[in-house]
Amino acid sequence: MSHRPADRVTWRPGPVGDAVRDSLEGRLREFIVDESSEPVVMFSPEAREVSDPGGWYGEHLGKWLVAASHAAQRTGDPVLTERIRAVVDFVSQNQEPSGYAGTYAHDAAWRMTETSSEKVRTWDVWVHAWTMMGLLRAGAIEPAVCIGELMLTTFAERSLLDLGNHAGLSSAVATEPLAELTLATGDPRFADLAARTVEELEFRLGFLSKDDAAEIGTGKAYQLLWCVTGLVALYRATGERRYLDAAIRRWLNIAEFHLSPLGGPWGGVAGHKEVFNSKGFFSPYGMTETCAAASWMSLCRELFKITGEARYAAAFERTLLNTLLGALDENGRDWVYFTFPNGRRNNTYHWACCRSSGAMALEQASGMVATSDESEVFVNLLHPAEVQFEQLGLALEISERAIHFKTDAETELTLKVRVPEGAQILSITLNGEPNDAVIQDGYLQISREWATGDELSWEVNTPIRVVPFTYSVDHHGQEVVRMDYAYVARGPWVYATGLIDGYRKEETLRIPRLTPEAPFRLENDEIRFYAPGRTPILFLPYYRAGGRHEGAWRTTWLQIAWQ
């Protein structure tokens, strides 16, 4: 199975569409304008010779190329298309004859071609990996191949894992672009280097075989997730099922033990701020790096494209709606470095990786709205948008409760509409008449000949859910710590409060154990908690709670006293 995204996506007003629009105008159009923009100039020979040692800043060009290319395809914007071409031309013209297209001086110790780079902190492979990804997404195969050839030569007798940090994970991320090079060119040598790197990861770190992600290397979430996505690309390039199976096992481990309620890979409480905590550790202040959330979404998207399983689309949507939207400032330009279930919005600095990762992940969401597989069309995200499948001569106008059809001619196909997490379909209507479409494997399915003017609609109930969690610690068989928490959700949306009563960051709620949702009432898309003798507590979707500006406070986990 291989899912193709819709050829064109036009977002309509709504939480996701508004965020995509704001990010395009606030970030993508401003950050890089042409070859004179700062993230591009650093790839010039003059800038290379005075670059700071070990810098990762060059990654921003590749990420911008990925995001801008998605946006240009989505919008057909000629100005954005021209900017992409200018940046690609600049990188190609300044690529050295060896294929080098990084930001480090020619004799610098941290340049990957120098054997001394194994003894210093270098991000050279990392920067080249992102540059390859950006060039490939922009359709610039030749300069990407030249980088790949340089890597084949440089690492013929050396190991990629000897460069970079986090036990080599920061250079092992090259597995994905190397595998994508094989897919783009048919040349197996690039995937061979990626496969050799994966085997070394297994030998040194137990990358394929260890049970828990936190035990691999330093447990660095962003790098690990990108390496796992590389396994999926390697499966596509080689057909070796063990790579896909390993990626699915790692996905399951992270989904069960290492996601916050907001859907983002979390950690950073007991150690390094960007690594997974040990399995079973809990804190309401656990943090999710925006880069890690973007990589988790990429992994979910790639696994969905191969398997078509609803669980990957559901995980993608939860992270998109809560962690990603919750990381974007209302100005569309600024992003937080970390999101916290309970914590303060803190916009990050200019060169932080998360600003580019967040904008990139937001643009890549367009590829998950609707996909096609032979004679089937999948609608995976029910957020207002119009999608076009050029080969099928089909356009769909999507909303939360209906899909409208436009076709060049009557088209026979199976439409599959994913039922959102936590939603209950009450009735289904086709062109105003009741329909008995089945729900199977998480999708509402109907097969027929479709024509312009057809409308499929449904009535849905999305009840409030109170999701409890008990954190306990045992010592020698005795329980020494016990804390009861809960958060409020509705469908894939997680709800949170701002400062309670205008100043308090926490509160213990008395909730009936048998009917925990009883004190909560839905009023439009707001939820209020009612208790005798106190002002109702307002809950909003997490991304809105407290305000969408720097300094806003959000509380998702609340302590519970069960009645």
Image: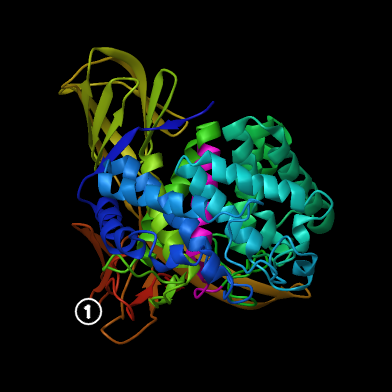
- Quarter of the figure with the N terminus: top right
Residue at position x 49%, y 59% in the image? 293
Q: Which quadrant holds residue 325?
A: bottom left
- Span highlighted in magenta in the image: 283-304
Image coordinates of residue 330 in percent, x first then y, are 27, 68
Report if residue 292 lies within the magenta region.
yes
For this rendering, which residue is in front, 213 or 475?
213
Q: Secondary structure at mark 1?
A: loop
Q: Nearer the viewer, residue 18 or 182?
A: 182
The amino acid type, in three-letter code, at marker 1 is Thr
Tell me which corner region of the image, top left, top right, bottom left or bottom right, holds residue 397.
top left
Looking at the image, is 510 positioned above or below residue 522? below
Q: Nearer the viewer, residue 178 or 366?
A: 178
Is 134 rendered above or below residue 220?
Answer: above
Is 231 or 176 nearer to us in this picture? 176
Question: x%, y% of residue 418?
Answer: 38, 35
Residue 243 falls within the magenta-colored stretch: no
- Relative image position of residue 238 (x, y in whole percent): 69, 32
Q: Residue at x 54, y 75 (%)?
A: 483
Residue 533 position (above or below residue 190): below
Q: Quadrant of the C terminus?
A: bottom left
